Structure formats: C-alpha cells, structure tokens
Image: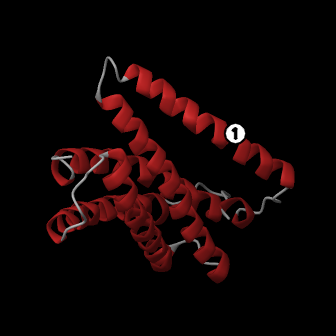
Amino acid sequence: MPIKNLGFEIKPLLVLISVVGLTFFAPLALFILKLLSRRFKVLEQFGKFAAVGTLNTFLYLAVINLLILLTDIARGTYYSVFVVAGFIIATTNSYLWNKFWTFQSRAPINLAEYGRFAFFTLIGVLINASTASLIVNVIGAPSGFNLKLWANIGALIAVFVSFLWNFISYRKIVFKNA
C-alpha cells in the first residue's frame, strides 16, 4: 500500500522479491540473535520485539497510506489522526504478539496487565504522533519534496523514536514477570 500511494507501480517481481527476502531474512536474523543471546540474554527477546515491531510497522504504514489514498490528504490535522489510527491498530496487534511470543507471558490476559500495556502504549502513541507531526507539520517537507513521501518519512522516524520507549516499558514494567 505505501508503494502504490507513493506513485510506484507494484510489479509482481517486486512483490516476489519482498516476500521471499523477508521470509528468509527474518528467520535468519532471529537465529543469529538467538546464538548471540547465549552471551547477551536480552538479544533474543530484542530480536523478537524487533520482528513484531517490523510487522507492526508494515501494518501502521498500511493504515496511514490507505487513509491517505482514500482521502488524498497527506498533511495537517487529518494526517495526525491517520497516524494515531495506524498506531492504535498496530499496537493492539503488538500486545498479543509481545505478550505471548516476545515476553512469553504465561498469565492469561488480565485487566491489570492490559491496563499497564494501554497506559504505556498511550505514552508511546503520544511520542509517536508528536514526532511524526513535528516532522511533517512543523519542520515540513523540503521545497519540492513529495508530500506523501515526506509523510512516510515522518511516520518511520516516529516509529524508531517510540520503539525504544516501548521495548523498555514493556520489558521492565508491563511483562516484567514473564
């Protein structure tokens, strides 16, 4: 979806290379991190978190770009709303993957844990949306730069900024007993 929204033609070869590349790269990266985790225990968990984050990033960008494609709006207040919608959908997906796979929590889903997750995710949403909105709406695209591409750059930078916050808060607070 982001590629089509940015004006690139989606060719079957590109899709095939992307799917095959990710299919082989992701397990290879997780295997390498598992080996390295013998020395640095947090690396396997971090690798899983990164894999879940990658999935969530694709989901996040797909939502934002679907909304941009449907409305032809790539900046302003509606852009900020699109970012928040994409982030909320991606973090709902994130909760389930991180709880049961990354942090291997055996506890059933409970309101207290989900409340902690929602609280720290809300802070992550604010960090994410603020960062993306700052880049897109305050800093703005360089003169002549494609606004849709700039919207995606703002969204990706926001992902990296909120990524560290989420990993630390989920690991140390939300799923600390896992």
**Which residue shows up at 34% across the image and 53% down it?**
100
Q: Quadrant of residue 92?
A: bottom left
Vertical arrangement, residue 174 with respect to residue 24, above or below? below
Closer-to-camera residue (137/153): 153
Vertical arrangement, residue 81 with respect to residue 53, above or below? below
Closer-to-camera residue (109/82): 109
Q: Position of residue 144 (x, y in %)?
A: 68, 58
Closer-to-camera residue (18/79): 18
Looking at this rendering, what residue extends furthest in the top direction?
A: 39
Q: Position of residue 19 (x, y in %)?
A: 71, 48
**Which residue shows up at 16% across the image and 50% down it?**
173
Looking at this rendering, what residue extends furthest in the bottom direction?
A: 71
According to the picture, the residue beneath numbered tag 1 turns out to be 21
Q: How many marks?
A: 1
Closer-to-camera residue (134/64): 64
**Which residue shows up at 25% across the image and 50% down it?**
170
The N terminus lies in which quarter of the figure?
A: bottom right
Vertical arrangement, residue 25 with respect to residue 155, above or below? above
Q: Quadrant of residue 164?
A: top left
Q: Position of residue 148 (x, y in %)?
A: 63, 64
Vertical arrangement, residue 108 with respect to residue 13, above or below? below
**Which residue shows up at 18% across the image and 63% down it?**
113
Counting other residues with Cα less than 10 Å from the Cα at mark 1, is it few (<14), some (14-19), or many (20 or more)?
few
Local SS, label 1: helix
What's the amino acid at mark 1? Gly
How are the colours assigned in the image? secondary structure
Q: Say whether residue 7 is left or right of residue 74.
A: right
Q: Position of residue 172 (x, y in %)?
A: 18, 45
